[in-house]
Image (tube, rainbow, N blue to C red):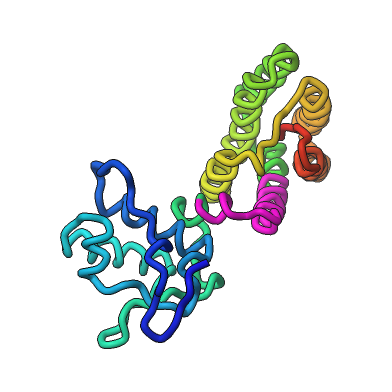
Amino acid sequence: MAKSGRNGVEDPAALKPWPKRPARLAHAVVESLTDSIVSGAIPSGSTLPVEPELCETFGVSRITIREAVKSLEAKGLVRARQGSGTTVTQSEEWNLLDPVVLAATVQHDGELVVLDHLVGVRSVLEAQMAAQAAELATDDDLREVEGLLDRLEDEIATPARFVESDVLFHDRIMQASRNRLGRSIIRTVHTQARSTFLYTGTPDGRACEQANAEHSRIVERLLARDPVGAAQAMTAHIEAAWSRRRVPHSGGTG
């Protein structure tokens, strides 16, 4: 971890310039600095290096650095004040729904605290949307959900394909709920979570079989137009699937 003091970051290694110059310079600077901040290499309360140092480190213009700092500020990662430099904020102020911030946070979530919270949010929102789908889904919606369930059954022996269809299954139920905001939130957080092995694990055939038995209960309650039952089945599935994946070196899907 970089040392910090009144003059900011003292260890240049806390900054991570890239080996190959990227096309989208400001975005690349933002991603690199976000990773350094979230990982703690540039700790909360420290100040970022001044513009000339950042320009030299990343090999970009002052305009690019200013654009990057504005983006970091919009994400809640830093606070820029005239005469005081750019200070890294406390983690409570970071916007975890921002894809760049969330991706870095998940990547460095060694103790799975954020992923536990993410699964909790997912469980609550998807249960609510399953209940809404039980009431609002059209017959066409339900036929498509049933079709995905059949597809998942056929793919139990091929976990890599099952995982991709599993995402479609959950998303189709959310679509049937007509809850656009809830679906957008879940798609944002789930996409970033799925980018890390800490969340996905290594699913095997047994885990896929268990997951699809839980999927079947969800579909059963949707077809019965049972909002309470659908919500309960969705909660049980998401929590059980995470408990299977959360055990070190185990697999799972959900």
Q: Nearer the viewer, residue 10 or 70?
A: 10
Closer-to-camera residue (201/207): 201
The reply to whether the magenta stretch includes residue 124 is: yes
Res. 93 in view: yes
Q: Position of residue 112 (x, y in %)?
A: 69, 54
Q: How many marks?
A: 0
Is the C terminus in the top left, top right, bottom left or bottom right quadrant? Answer: top right
* x then y, percent, for residue 64: 20, 59
Residue name at image x 66 percent, y 42 percent: 199
Specify the segment rendered in magenta: 104-127
Q: Residue at x 26, y 54 (%)?
A: 26
Of 120 and 62, the residue lying toward us:
62
- Find residue 109 and report its horizontal and vertical position in percent: 63, 55
Most frequent secondary structure within the magenta stretch: helix
Residue 104 placement, left or right of 153:
left
Q: Where 30 falls versus 174 (above or below)? A: below
Q: Please name the residue shown 51% across and 50% down the image.
A: 103
Residue 85 found in image quarter: bottom left
Is residue 79 placed above or below 148 in the rendered structure?
below
Q: Quadrant of residue 30?
A: bottom left
Q: Does any portion of residue 231 appear in the rendered image?
A: no
Q: Can you say whether 29 is above or below 131 in the image?
A: below
- Horizontal and vertical percent position of residue 107: 56, 49
Nearer-the-camera pick, 124 or 245: 245
149 sits left or right of 39 in the view: right
115 is within the stretch colored magenta? yes
Picture quadrant of residue 15: bottom left
The residue lying at 49 percent from left, 67 percent from top is 94
